[in-house]
Amino acid sequence: MSPAFGKQLPDNPPGAEDAMQSRKSWTAEPRREARRTWASPGHVKHLRKPQRDQGFTLLQEPDAMPVCSDGEEEDPVVRGAPSRVSFRINVASSLLEAQMEGHPGWLLVCHEHWSLSLGTLLCRQLGYLRMTHQKGVNLTDVKVNNTQEFVQVRPHQEGSLEDMWQVRSSCESGRIAALKCSECGLRRGAARVVGGADVPPGRWPWQVSVYHGSQHHCGGSVLAHEWIVTAAHCVHSYRRLQASAWLVFAGVITHGSIKQEAGVSVKKIIYHPLYNDNSLDYDIALLKLQVPLNFSDAVRAVCLPPAQQDLFQGTRCWVSGWGYTRPDQAQVTETLKEALVPLIGTKRCNSSCMYAGELTARMLCAGYLHGKIDACQGDSGGPLVCQDEAAWRLVGIVSWGQGCAEPNHPGVYTNVAQLLPWIHHVTEVSSASKGVSPATRRTDESQH
């Protein structure tokens, strides 16, 4: 990461800019002349998009570049799906609760007409990869007031998720639904270091280092015991290699402590079928591991964005990685770094002052218009996470940019919320079957 990535910051520092004095950008190989990607050293110069027929162009002196205006933008950077019904799981009781238009408060969900597939769908709506447990709880075992209302699944489950519910004054079965989803987005035992230089163990337990040979190549994030998500541009250029040539190291803070035998081999690499190597649209890939990871305080999964959540310009999120701390330094950092960056409105980021329309709906921007704090080579594929009241969410994947920490050229990230259906499809199909799904392009041990 660029200069600001050098300092360990508290969870909610009063001023991101002051706290991270100089951090640049990180990637694994893509942003082009006006774009860079952030992969490991030896593969790319100055984070730029992968346009193999273009040479490297010297960066303009920051002082000579005008800074774009920092006005307000009302449109959300990450737009959730509109809905008349929303859900949550009570942390203490695991009871499923629903909120519907025209009905104040949270309603309990009757167990009538419940199904396993519905439980899985609801977990995904809430940003979890899987459902782990579900059951019907007797109403006699729960404290319920006389005014409590309920919702029940309609007998014929047709149409969208929001159309299959009806409000009831009671549950005929006398039971309500309890639901547990795969745990994610929590940082148990993570020490808080104020004023320190590096990231402590357990602070970003979903961060992984993706190795090619004996070198760090890209970052990635743990989605489940056997699933890692990274940027497609990190691995696409090496698609003729066997998937097992890649190693994933989880729970790592310093590269000096890495032992090769501790790495987990990749079994299969799955690119988004619409990935474009030039524009970096759909810049996402899933790595299925040969052996599932053992979760601990240092190794955990990150949550995905909930389906209905809007995130607006100015939302403060964290990016982490081992990328360059200076754009002219062809070497990844020894220790994991972090930076606090605000989301930037897509209209502004796509303006002529910044990226002039290069962003697609599968991309988002985060960073500072004055530069100085950004991701850089070696950071590509790593996480951009934002925290809500429930958990840490993987909002973006480090993808590309122009230079490192240049004014008016903030980091560009894969917009994970736009790709949730593909993520769920791939992880579901691969977990249920060892066969190859025709709907996805994937590589295995013999073909990358």
Image (spheres, rainbow, N blue to C red):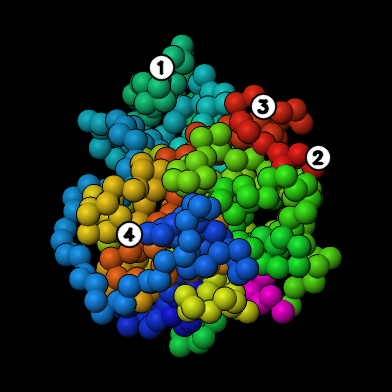
Q: Position of residue 271 (x, y in %)?
A: 60, 40
Q: Which residue is mark 3?
A: 437
Q: Residues within 10 Å of mark 2 (few under 14, many from 20)?
A: few
> Which mark is nearer the camera, 4 or 1?
4
Q: Which residue is mark 2?
A: 446
| Type of the residue with mark 1 | Gly
In reply to whether residue 255 is colored magenta, the answer given is yes
* Depicted 237 relative to depicted 380: above or below: above
Separation of marks 4 and 1 at Cα, in angstroms: 34 Å
Quadrant of res 149: top left
**Number of the label disc, if any, that sits on residue 343:** 4
| Type of the residue with mark 4 | Leu
Tell me which segment is drawn in magenta.
252-256
| Type of the residue with mark 3 | Ser
Q: Which residue is mark 1?
A: 159
Residue furthest to the top in view is 156
Q: Position of residue 403 (x, y in %)?
A: 41, 67
Separation of marks 1 and 2 at Cα, in angstroms: 41 Å
Do tag 2 and tag 3 residues touch (Cβ < 8 Å)?
A: no
